[in-house]
Amino acid sequence: MAEVLILTEDVFLSAAMTEHPQGGRRAGGSAPLHGAGDVPKCAGAGSPGVDRRRSAGPGNLGTLVRSAEAFGATGMILLPGTVSLWNAKTLRASSGSAFRLPVLALTAEAAFTALRDQGLRIVAAVARDGDSEADLHGPSALLIGNEGSGLPEAWIAQADARVTIPFTGAVESLNAAIAGSVLLYDAMRQRLKAKTMDQGRT
């Protein structure tokens, strides 16, 4: 049963966190809670999980959550230093995906242990010297870092493979959310291609 409150425009605007709110409705509720036991949902079942280090902004994280759901990821793990999933801008950028995709926060040690225990192949996204055609069709976890500082070398060293997105032009790197989205799409494409080939053999 939801409680409905009708507010005056002044009161509504005082509660809004955006400069030009669209108006009409606002909602409050309890955030879904996930724990270490949810790691299989977040990074397994034949789909890539996303192990996210830091976001340059809440919009990056929200966009990545939305892309993760769109391209079939089973969940996301947030590591220390990541902006809160429940930041208003993150939620807005996720377009509702934050409430549907399992997302949990773990320490780096707990995350790597959980991913290994689930038998996932860990793939680190790096700006250069990675494989531009990395195998992402099997159960895997993508490590995506901040576009400014990237992933810590210690974490990259623990990965089973490194992937780099090739591009032309003078830009030095891609936005973290865009890079993650490109890799998530490629993982989905590879899985669909493998599934089609398997069906063709039967």
Image (cartoon, rainbow, N blue to C red):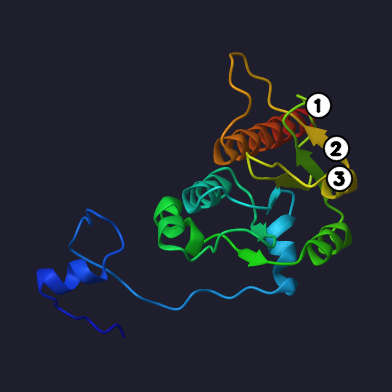
Count of numbered badges drawn on the protein: 3
10 to 111, vertically: above or below: below
Q: Nearer the viewer, residue 104 or 15?
A: 15
Around disc 2, counting alpha carbons within 10 Å, would you say few (fewer than 14), some (14 to 19), or many (20 or more)?
Answer: some
x 49%, y 52%: residue: 62
Residue identified by numbered label 1: 131
For the residues labelled 2 and 3, the Cα–Cα distance comes to 5 Å
Dot 2 falls on a residue whose secondary structure is: strand
> In the image, is 9 to the left or to the right of 159?
left
Say what secondary structure mark 3 lies in. Answer: loop
Alpha carbons under labels 1 and 2: distance apart: 8 Å
Tell me residue 81's x, y (percent): 65, 60
Query: Would you say the residues marked 2 and 3 are in contact, meaning their CB atoms lie under 8 Å apart?
Result: yes
Please state the horizontal and vertical placement of residue 52, each as a whole percent of the image: 67, 52
Whole-percent x, y for residue 165 in the image:
68, 26
> What amino acid is found at the position of numbered circle 2 in the picture?
Ala
> Which residue position holds label 2?
161
Residue that carries the numbered disc 3 in the rendered image: 159
**Quarter of the picture holding the N terminus:** bottom left
Mark with earlier residue (1, 2): 1
Vertically, is 90 above or below 163?
Answer: below
Q: Quadrant of residue 25?
A: bottom left
Q: Amino acid at mark 3?
A: Ala
Give the residue furthest to the top.
169
In this rendering, position of residue 195 left or right of residue 10: right
Rendering quarter of residue 193: top right
The secondary structure type at the circle numbered 1 is: loop
Q: Residue at x 63, y 73 (%)?
A: 34
Q: Is residue 200 above or below residue 105?
A: above
Could you tell me if the residues under marks 1 and 3 are in contact, i.e. CB atoms within 8 Å? no
Front one among 163 and 74: 163
Q: Residue at x 51, y 50 (%)?
A: 57
